[in-house]
Image (spheres, helix red, strand yellow):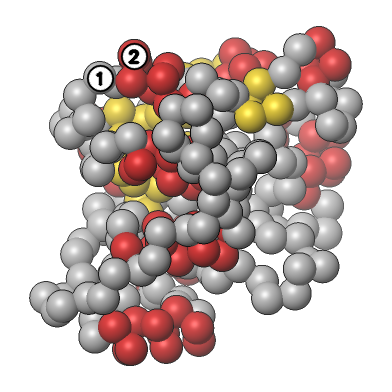
Amino acid sequence: SVSLSPGAARLRASRPASARASRVASARGFVPRAFFGGGRKFAAAKVPAVPFPNGTPGPDGIVPGVGKGMPKWPEVWEWLNYEKRMPTVDSAEAVAMMRKGAVLLDVRFDPDYEKWSIPGSVHVPYVTGGVLAKMRLPGFKRKNEDFVRLVREAIPDKRTKIILACIWGGSLVREPPKNRGLTDDTKGAGSLPGAFELYQDGYENLYHLYGGVNQYYQDCAFDENLPEGEGVWPGDLEWFGYRQFVQKDRLKGQRDD
C-alpha cells in the first residue's frame, strides 16, 4: 500500500471545508467535492453561476491572476472553487495521471526549476526576472506576461489534462483570510493564478498539485512508488530547511516564488 506523508494523510482523510465554503455550498444546492481522488464531481444539482472576478483584461484579453488589473484574490479563489470546480490532487495521483498522458506544468521561477524538478514535467514560469531577481533580492521579480502564450506553445491541445504546480501550492481547501493583515497562504506562488488565466484561454482540464513541488519531494521519502525528483531539493539542506520552515508549517512553505 502507498504511504503518505503525515500532512497529506491528514488532508486526504477529510476535506476540511471552511464555514464560509459550507454556507456557499449549501446555498447553491450541492455538496462539496472530494479534496483528493482525481477531482470527483459535485453531486448532480443545478448550481447558480459564480460571478467572474472583477478585474481588467490585458492586451491579450485575459484578466491577470497577479499584477496590474488583477481581481481580489478571494473572488478568484471562489471562482476556481465553485464555478470551475478545480480539482486538487496529491503527488501519487499526479504521477498516476502523468502515466496516462496528463502533463505536469511547473510554473516556478527559472532558477528553481533548473536545480530541482519533478521528472517528466513541463516548465513555463509564471514569474520571471533578471540577475537581481535570481539573487533573491525582493521586488525584482515580475509576472511573466507571456505565460499563457508559452503554455499554448508547449501544450497546444486545450483538452489535455494539466496539473499545475508551483513551489508550495496554495490551497483551494482553506478559504482566504478575512483579515488582510494576515499572510494569505491560499494563493500559492503561481499555480492557482496561472490556472485562472489558463481557464480564460480555453483550457478546461486543469488540476492543482497539493503542496506544490516542495510536497512532492517530501512525499518521495514516504512513498517508494514516486519517481525520485531530479536535482537536489533545497529542503534537504539544513540551512534552507531552517530558513524556510522554522516555526512554520512545513507543508505550506513561505517563499513566494
Q: Is residue 77 visible?
A: no
Q: Position of residue 249 (x, y in %)?
A: 70, 59
Say which residue label 2 marks.
153
Say left or right for 153 vs 238: left
Q: Position of residue 244 (x, y in %)?
A: 79, 43
Q: Is residue 74 above or below residue 219?
A: below
Say left or right for 12 vs 243: left
Q: Position of residue 51 (x, y in %)?
A: 39, 66
Q: Residues within 10 Å of mark 2 (few under 14, many from 20)?
A: few
Which one is in front, 195 or 250? 195
> Based on the displayed image, in which of its 4 quarters is residue 83 positioned?
bottom left
Say left or right for 150 vs 110: left
Q: Is residue 28 visible?
A: yes
Which one is in front, 7 or 145? 145
Which one is in front, 107 or 37? 107
Residue at 66% across, 21% down? 128
> Based on the displayed image, in which of its 4 quarters is residue 203 positioned?
top left
Q: Which residue ends up furthest to the top in the rendered image?
A: 131
Cβ atoms under marks 2 and 1 closer than 8 Å: yes
In the rendering, which numbered label is found on residue 4?
A: none
Say which residue label 1 marks.
156
Which amino acid type is shown beneath numbered disc 2? Glu
Which amino acid type is shown beneath numbered disc 1? Pro
Q: Secondary structure at mark 1?
A: loop
